[in-house]
Structures are given as C-alpha cells and as structure tokens.
C-alpha cells in the first residue's frame, strides 16, 4: 500500500490491512440484515481473493484492475466455481475461493459492481483509497424483467389455496402440525404482504387489538414501525394455526410465540424459523403444489414462486380488487408512493377489462358500418 495512505495516517479506519478494511466496511454497511451481510461479505471476499492472486492492494487498484476483477466473475475459471457432483448438484468447495455457483448474470454483474462501488466510496471517504475505481467501470445493459412475471395469477392463487386445504389432515400428528404451519405461512404472507425479514422477526404479541380491530405491528425498513390490518380471513387462519399449536385462539400482549415458529423440538413455541428456512419452506411447498397441478401455466408460476412473490401478489391482487393506492402504500410500508403505483400498472385484471371494453367498442363500430 502506498505510504501516503498506509503510513501517512490519512486513513481514519485504523485498519491493519485490506481484509481488515473490508471487515470494517462490512460492519458499518452490511449489518442491516443477515442476508445483506452474507451477500456483501461474499462479494468482498471475492475481491480479496483476486487481490491476493494479482499481488495488488485496494489502494493500488486501477479502473482496468476493477474491470478485470468483474470480468473474472462473469467468465470465471474453475478455481472460483463451486464444484458439482456427477448428478449436477453442488458439492463441497475444494478451495476457499470457490464461492460462485455459476458465472455472474448481467444482473449479478451490475449488483456486484454496485456493492464494490459502495465499498470504495466508503474507503475513499475514510482516506484509505484515492478514488472509486469501480464507479468508472463498464455498466452493461440489463434487460428489465416484467414485474408481472413475479405475481401469482388469480388462478394460481386459487389453486394453491385449494391444494393447501387437503394438506391439513395427514395421519401423523407432526405432519398435521407442519401442514397447519404451511397454510398459516401462505395466509400470513398473502394477506399482509409483509417482507420475509418482517415475518421471521415478528411475534404473536405483535398481533394487537384497538378500536379498529386486530392489527399486526411490523418493524419494517429503516426501523419504522407500521400496523398491517388483520382481515377476517387472516384472523380465522391465525386461530386455526394456534389451535393446531395447542394455544388459545388469540395472542395476549405478552405472548412469546414467534409469528412463524418451529414445529419441532422442546422450545418450538418460542423459537422462530430463520429467513433462509422460510424461503426454503415456501419454495419446496410451491414446487410440491406445482407438481400436482394439471395446468402447465399455473405449475410454471408456482415453480418460480418465492417469499417476495407473495408480497408482489398481495399488492397486485389488492389493487385489482379496488383497494386505494394510499392504503396499499401504508399496508406494505412503501416510503415512496411511486413504488406502490408499479403494482397498479401490472394489475392484469383491470387491464384485461379495459382491453375487452376496447374490443367491444371496435366490434360495435363494425356493426354500425355494416348496417349503413
């Protein structure tokens, strides 16, 4: 590292080297969630591996170096890719450098570039590096995905709910409890539209009652608390699940049970599932539903379903049903109303109704012309 940066005392980080500097940045910027911290750490570690191979330091990097590092992730050699076994499944990495499941997509490239640019901006502010070399690298064109591709259709939603009902009555008591928890998870995510982090952090004590009825108190982004309406249907699903857990139908203000608890183990009633487990639960559940569907379009939707799909679906179906933008914004916790407006733009039912009105008008005009 150049003396003007490391020995001259310009940096206020107090870092003992590049790995320490990245760790300090990670502590400051990556602590918003476990998922964010894990992702940022992986991106930082990949950069440190590249530096070790090229015998460079963060402060010595040029724009060309930054581009070369990003390109190595887009077209990685085997030393960076996690190996796969004979059936194509991921195996145990042979080297610490093997952290990539596959070459970075265009979206992954842009995301890594953004995170590394944030890292260098932080280090530049601290006086650890002279310039933000990643901000000057190539910005590839990324095809934007249609937001409607992340929304479960009305037909898909109806099918999933019908598929969940028979799952309640397996023979084994434990399987009954798992099925009840699965149904509750889907109801909670669909009727509230809360984020995965909000769901796993919630407690039954956050279900509160006031003069307007039952509500769910949610700690959202920016440490802001909001209240989400507990509809009559969601209330019935809550009581159904709590009955399966062997507890009173409605929570008390000091109820320690998580919103989504484990259903095994001695401390199941007080131990929440992790965000990763929630994502796995939803993915496996929806893939099982997809395999039982006779409709290939519904099956395709469900195979791609994720926790965040429930949030998109909740917002879109809510607006399709005629809900107001402002109440939808408040329920979802959007800071910017433009975010909520995106869901109004992809509400397919309203668009189809308008398209059919247009079609009917054209047909009527044609009949008038024939009658002349």
Image (spheres, rainbow, N blue to C red):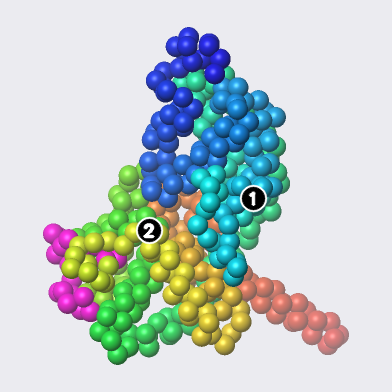
Q: For mark 1, what is the residue?
A: 78
Residue at image location 41% in from the left, 30% down from the top = 24
Residue at image location 49% in from the left, 27% down from the top = 18
Circle 1: is it few (<14), some (14-19), or many (20+) Cα within 10 Å?
few
Residue 333 is labelled as none
Residue 49 lies, with reference to residue 182, above or below; the image says above
| Mark with earlier residue (2, 1) | 1
Instruction: Give the position of the C terminus as an image quadrant.
Output: bottom right
| Chain part drawn in magenta | 243-261
Residue at image location 31% in from the left, 74% down from the top = 181
Query: Do tag 2 and tag 1 residues touch (Cβ < 8 Å)?
Result: no
Q: Relative to the observer, which residue lies in front, 335 or 195? A: 195
Image quadrant assignment for residue 164: bottom left
| Residue 98 is at least partly visible in this image | yes
Q: Position of residue 72 (x, y in %)?
A: 66, 42
What distance separates the C-alpha of mark 2 from that of mark 1?
Answer: 30 Å
Q: Position of residue 45 (x, y in %)?
A: 51, 39
Q: Position of residue 239 (x, y in %)?
A: 23, 76
Q: For mark 2, what is the residue?
A: 275
């Amino acid at each position: 590292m150049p003396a003007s940066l490391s020995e001259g005392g310009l940096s206020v980080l107090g870092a003992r080297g590049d790995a320490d500097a990245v760790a300090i940045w990670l502590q400051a910027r990556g602590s918003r969630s476990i998922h964010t911290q894990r992702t940022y750490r992986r991106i930082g570690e990949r950069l440190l591996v590249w530096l070790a191979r090229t015998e460079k330091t963060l402060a010595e990097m040029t724009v060309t170096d930054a581009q070369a590092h990003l390109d190595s992730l887009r077209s990685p050699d085997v030393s960076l890719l996690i190996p796969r076994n004979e059936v194509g499944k991921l195996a145990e990495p042979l080297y610490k450098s093997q952290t990539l499941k596959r070459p970075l997509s265009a979206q992954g490239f842009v995301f890594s570039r953004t995170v590394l640019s944030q890292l260098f901006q932080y280090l530049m502010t601290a006086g650890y590096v002279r310039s933000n070399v990643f901000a000057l690298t190539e910005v590839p064109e990324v095809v934007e995905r249609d937001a409607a591709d992340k929304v479960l259709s009305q037909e898909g939603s109806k099918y999933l709910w019908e598929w969940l009902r028979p799952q309640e009555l397996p023979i084994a008591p434990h399987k009954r409890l798992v099925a009840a928890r699965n149904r509750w998870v889907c109801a909670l995510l669909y009727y509230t539209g809360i984020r995965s982090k909000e769901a796993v952090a919630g407690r039954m004590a956050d279900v509160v009652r006031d003069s307007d009825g039952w509500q769910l108190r949610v700690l959202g982004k920016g440490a802001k608390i909001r209240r989400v309406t507990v509809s009559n249907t969601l209330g019935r699903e809550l009581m159904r699940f709590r009955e399966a857990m062997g507890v009173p139908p409605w929570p008390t203000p000091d109820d320690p049970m998580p919103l989504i608890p484990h259903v095994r183990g001695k401390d199941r009633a007080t131990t929440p599932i992790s965000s990763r487990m929630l994502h796995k639960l939803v993915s496996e559940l929806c893939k099982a539903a997809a395999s039982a569907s006779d409709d290939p379009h519904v099956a395709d939707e469900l195979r791609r379903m994720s926790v965040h799909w429930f949030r998109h679906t909740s917002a879109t179906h809510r607006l399709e049903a005629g809900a107001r933008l402002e109440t939808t914004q408040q329920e979802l916790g959007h800071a910017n109303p433009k975010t909520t407006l995106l869901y109004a733009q992809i509400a397919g039912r309203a668009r189809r109704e308008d398209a059919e009105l247009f079609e009917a008008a054209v047909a009527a005009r044609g009949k008038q012309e024939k009658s002349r």
